Image (tube, rainbow, N blue to C red):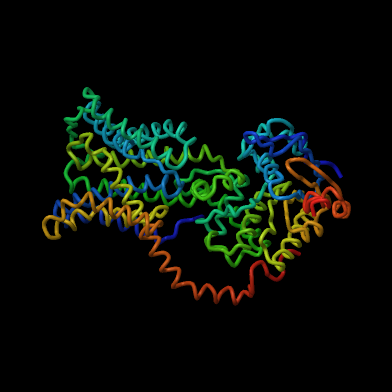
């Protein structure tokens, strides 16, 4: 993608921002809690997609950076009394720095080796959160004091909702600009062919490291938003189950597409609610269902639900496209009048 | 005419296999220099050494008087050498326009990618203008917003060439630009190559099996067989060279 943002995207983001302010006045607390969760997952999943869908790097350390964001923001606030507006960016920066450091050796690896190495890093990070009792509270977890954001005390779902919405909107705008930039094109070029990218002047190693660091920053920011509406964190939140949940959101929704990932976040994020409404007994199958959905998505829709929707849209548009090329007079490949001389 | 590009005594080994054996060639500025030989002769290995995808065990490669063997892969295009790929390596999920924009990488000013800025608008507008000009020249304009992976074979080849041209190279390495194309498409490539070399003054090194194209456009031909140079000369000289005929068809005794 290239150039300026379509006005449509800005209208949608502005609408989201408006909802962030209005909804807390209208909806019951439980819905606001769901909304907060979905918005947090949106930031987390878009960050994972920057690596997975945009850069084609199968890296699974994301949950570790999410943890650094949560513990970092919470500890800076509870221990050092650093306010959220400073603490969250610092924690996210720390996550980014860790991502950058992890990327330096990891970018030598590809495919399943990269996946294994980064997954091992996530396991190590969870172990650190679990055993570093003095700082993280170990497996007992850490109580998070309600942070205040520029004088506005969060901590409850209605109070946190507008702040989480603002954070999500800022991240969305940055992502839209990023994916339409030079750097965004370089990410895609590396995904599609490292050789073509390098031969075109893209510093493949550097761009991969930048992608790792950016992706980690998103996870750190998502971790920061967690502290706004949750009062407690323990290392169990940062396990492989969480990783698979975010991965399913990206893969089912549509890797490499912001709208696709948002779709996946909403569908997969609301799945437990749907199961709760369904006949009793289905809820126990939740984990099984996530696995099954992930498996089916990988097998039958490699570009996710959004990929299917896009394909449908382009099939419907195809006849029009053919008419256009007939009008221009392209009777066959490479047979254009007035070219070459 | 002066030599703009030279390869001296370059050898490449992959394990026990010697892919290139003390290979040398000199390319004159503005010429179309063809590199031919049977499959597996080491032609693409020559390109991969120049692109810095593979490291020769010995030898020198110089472009415009500068050694390029100290440069990393992504600096080669900035030094003035662009290339295409033999096996369709297209950026499948990117559009035709985006692919050419990737080709412009070395010529686009950098900017902060997270927000709007005057520098960004200027850089992007300039890049899209340049890309469009190349799309018109290569006949790809009607497919500007199609995904590269959805183009047919001939258009994918042309897009690869368009991407390489976008870098504004002084030397263009083309790896089988006409391989698998139909006659009408080969005629288009023929005219395009002559236009690139004669009108724009871009030097071309051309790997190609389509002899009709090689004989029509090449100023000079180097023949490789089993990693060694076996002949070099004008198309007329090469056509009648018994060593070349042997390398391609086997010796008279075996026939």
Residue at (64% x, 68% y) in the render: A333
Question: From this viewpoint, is residue B201 visible?
Answer: no
* Residue B171 % position (x, y): 73, 46
Side of A3 relative to A36 (left or right): right
Which image quadrant: the C terminus of chain B? bottom right
Residue at (85% x, 55% y) in the render: B239
Residue at (65% x, 34% y) in the render: B16
Side of A209 relative to A78 (left or right): right
Which image quadrant: the N terminus of chain B? top right
Q: Nearer the viewer, residue B64 or A268?
A: A268
Q: Nearer the viewer, residue B133 or B163?
A: B163
Side of A223 relative to B169 (left or right): left
Which residue of the protein is positioned furthest toward the left in this rendering?
A280
* Residue A146 % position (x, y): 18, 37
Quadrant in the rendering for residue B249: bottom right
User: Is residue A310 positioned above or below A92 on the image?
Assistant: below
User: Is residue B181 positioned above or below A101 on the image?
Assistant: below
* Residue A309 % position (x, y): 38, 65
* Residue B38 % position (x, y): 73, 50
Side of A120 relative to A80 (left or right): right
User: Is residue B42 positioned above or below A83 on the image?
Assistant: below
């Amino acid at each position: 993608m290239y150039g300026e943002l379509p006005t449509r995207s800005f209208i949608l983001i502005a609408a989201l921002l408006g909802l962030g302010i209005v909804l807390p006045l209208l909806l019951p607390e439980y819905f606001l809690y769901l909304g907060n969760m979905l918005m947090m997952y949106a930031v987390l999943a878009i960050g994972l997609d920057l690596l997975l869908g945009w850069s084609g790097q199968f890296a699974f350390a994301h949950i570790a950076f999410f943890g650094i964001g949560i513990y970092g923001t919470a500890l800076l606030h509870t221990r050092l009394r650093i306010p959220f507006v400073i603490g969250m960016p610092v924690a996210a920066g720390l996550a980014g720095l860790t991502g950058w450091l992890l990327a330096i050796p990891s970018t030598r690896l590809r495919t399943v080796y990269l996946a294994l190495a980064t997954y091992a890093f996530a396991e190590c990070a969870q172990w650190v959160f679990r055993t570093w009792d003095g700082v993280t509270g170990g497996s007992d977890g850490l109580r998070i004091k309600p942070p205040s954001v520029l004088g506005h005390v969060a901590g409850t779902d209605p109070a946190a909702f507008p702040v989480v919405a603002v954070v999500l909107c800022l991240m969305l705008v940055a992502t839209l600009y990023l994916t339409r930039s030079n750097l965004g094109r370089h990410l895609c070029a590396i995904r599609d062919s490292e050789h073509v990218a390098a031969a075109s002047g893209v510093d493949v190693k550097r761009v991969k490291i930048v992608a790792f660091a950016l992706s980690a920053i998103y996870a750190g920011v998502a971790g920061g938003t967690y502290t706004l509406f949750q009062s407690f964190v323990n290392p169990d939140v940062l396990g492989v189950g969480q990783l698979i949940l975010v991965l399913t959101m990206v893969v089912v929704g549509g890797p490499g597409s912001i709208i696709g990932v948002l779709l996946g976040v909403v569908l997969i994020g609301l799945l437990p609610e749907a199961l709760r409404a369904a006949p009793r007994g289905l809820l126990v199958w939740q984990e099984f269902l996530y696995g099954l959905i992930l498996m089916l998505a990988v097998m039958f829709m490699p570009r996710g639900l959004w990929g299917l929707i896009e394909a449908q849209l382009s099939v419907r548009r195809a006849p029009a496209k053919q008419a256009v090329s007939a009008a221009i007079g392209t009777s066959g490949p490479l047979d254009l009048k007035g070219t070459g001389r | 005419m002066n030599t703009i590009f030279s390869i001296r005594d370059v050898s490449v080994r992959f394990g026990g296999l010697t892919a290139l054996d003390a290979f040398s060639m000199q390319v004159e500025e503005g010429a179309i220099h063809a590199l031919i030989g049977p499959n597996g002769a080491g032609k693409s290995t020559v390109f991969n050494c120049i692109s810095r995808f593979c490291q020769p065990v010995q030898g020198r490669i110089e472009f415009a008087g500068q050694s390029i063997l100290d440069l990393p892969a992504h600096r080669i295009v900035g030094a003035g050498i662009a290339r295409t790929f033999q096996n369709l390596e297209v950026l499948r999920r990117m559009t035709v326009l985006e692919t050419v924009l990737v080709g412009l990488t070395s010529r686009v000013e950098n900017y902060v990618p997270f927000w709007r800025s005057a520098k960004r608008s200027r850089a992007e507008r300039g890049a899209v203008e340049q890309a469009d000009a190349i799309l018109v020249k290569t006949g790809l304009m009607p497919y500007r917003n199609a995904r590269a992976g959805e183009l047919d074979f001939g258009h994918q080849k042309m897009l690869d060439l368009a991407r390489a041209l976008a870098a504004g190279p002084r030397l263009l390495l083309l790896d089988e630009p006409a391989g698998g194309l139909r006659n009408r498409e080969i005629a288009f490539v023929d005219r395009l190559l002559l236009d690139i070399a004669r009108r724009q003054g871009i030097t071309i090194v051309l790997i190609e099996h389509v002899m009709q194209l090689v004989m029509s456009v090449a100023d000079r031909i180097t023949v490789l067989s089993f990693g060694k140079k076996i002949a070099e000369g004008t198309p007329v000289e090469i056509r009648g060279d018994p060593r070349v005929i042997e390398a391609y068809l086997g010796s008279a005794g075996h026939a």
